[in-house]
Amino acid sequence: MPDRVRAIRRLADGWEIESRTNTIRARNVVANVLPGALRSLVDETTRLSPRVERLQRQVSGGWGACM
């Protein structure tokens, strides 16, 4: 059963991931979401990689994917 992530928080030594049913800690996070969705999961004080911002501009400019 899926356990949707509700929030991702930066900690001094890694990350805290909060889902509907659990909270876990991790050294690294791989998020399979669009950049805008990632921004909605992290709080405003968390700095994301400049690459995330660049990817969001590409999405806003018409970038797309097909599966």
Image (spheres, rainbow, N blue to C red):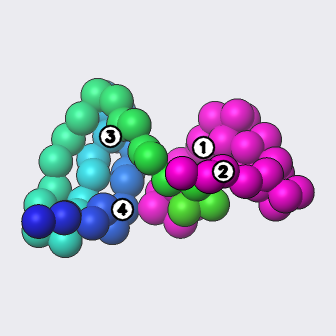
Residue 66 versus residue 2 in the image, above or below = above
Q: Amino acid at mark 1?
A: Arg
Q: Amino acid at mark 3?
A: Trp
Q: Secondary structure at mark 4?
A: strand
Residue 53 versus residue 29 in the image, above or below = below
The numbered dot on residue 7 is 4
Residue 37 showing in the rendered view: yes
Q: Residues within 10 Å of mark 2 (few under 14, many from 20)?
A: few
Q: Is residue 2 left or right of residue 52?
A: left
Tell me the distance, in whole angstroms, between the alpha carbons under discs 4 and 3: 10 Å
The numbered dot on residue 65 is 2
Query: What residue is disc 1 on?
Result: 47
Magenta residues, as a range?
38-67
Q: Nearer the viewer, mark 1 or mark 2?
A: 2
Q: Is residue 57 left or right of residue 34?
A: right
Tell me the distance, in whole angstroms, between the alpha carbons under discs 1 and 2: 26 Å
Q: How many marks?
A: 4
Query: What residue is disc 3 on?
Result: 15
What residue is shown at x 27% (from left), y 66% (from top)? 4
